[in-house]
Every structure is written in structure tokens, then in C-alpha cells.
Amino acid sequence: MEEKRKHPRTEINEPAFVSSGGSVMHCVVRNISPEGAAIDVENPAFVPQRFRLVMANDSSVVHQCRIAWIKKNRIGLTFVGEA
């Protein structure tokens, strides 16, 4: 498959949270770049189209995200600016 990203993704395995409208859901960040990330969640149906991704190990790291794609329990995210 041809790589379409401007920045390569860094493989990680870090806990994080999907935060939107007062609700919070646990997720795991599988890879990340300056432009986006891929996360694993228990049920993608409960993840809104736009949300904040908050890193569990450092809650000062917050990304505004929108969903780019969903494949089973993995969601591809695009960062859309500052949170």
C-alpha cells in the first residue's frame, strides 16, 4: 500500500482517553505523528466524529481530533488544531 502521510507514524502503546461533551472513554494509542494517530477502542460506535484525545500518562497532552477512518476496533484520527 502506498504511504500517503506527510509524516511517518511512530509506533507506541500508550493509554489515553477520548473526551467529548463531558463523557470520557478509555483507549490505547497505537501510533502517532504530528498530524494524527491510530487508537484502539472497545466500541467505535460510541466515539463521536470530533473529540479530544487526552494522553493518560501526561494529561497536558491534548489533541483535537476528527475520525478519518474506522476498521474494526481501530480508529484513524486527524489532528485538527489545538484543544
Image (spheres, rainbow, N blue to C red):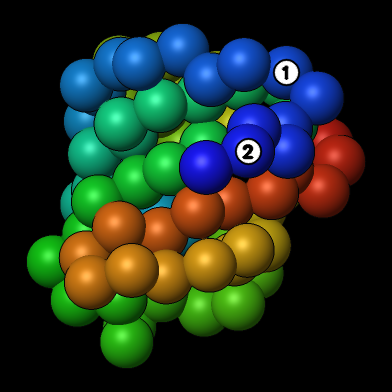
Q: Is residue 40 above or below residue 14?
A: below
Label 2 belongs to which residue?
2
Which residue is at a point 30% across and 31% down the rendered structure image? 30
Of circles 2 and 1, the one toward us is 2
Q: Is residue 79 above or below residue 43?
A: above
Quarter of image, res 58: top left
Which residue is at a point 32% across and 87% down the rendered structure image? 45
The residue tagged with tag 1: helix, strand or loop?
loop
Which residue is at a point 30% across and 16% down the rendered structure image? 12
Residue farthest to the bottom?
A: 45
Amino acid carrying label 2: it is: Glu
Q: Nearer the viewer, residue 63 or 31?
A: 31
Q: Position of residue 18 (x, y in %)?
A: 41, 55
Cα separation, mark 2 vs mark 1, equals 13 Å
Amino acid carrying label 1: it is: His
Which residue is at a point 86% across and 41% down the rendered structure image? 81
Q: Earlier in the sequence, mark 2 or mark 1?
A: 2
Label 1 belongs to which residue?
7
Q: Position of residue 22 (x, y in %)?
A: 47, 70
The residue tagged with tag 2: helix, strand or loop?
loop
Left or right, 5 with respect to 70, comes to: right
Q: Is residue 25 visible?
A: no
Q: Residues within 10 Å of mark 1 (few under 14, many from 20)?
A: few
Left or right, 19 with respect to 4, comes to: left
Q: Is residue 4 visible?
A: yes
Q: Position of residue 51 (x, y in %)?
A: 59, 62
Residue farthest to the right?
A: 81
Left or right, 18 with respect to 63, comes to: left
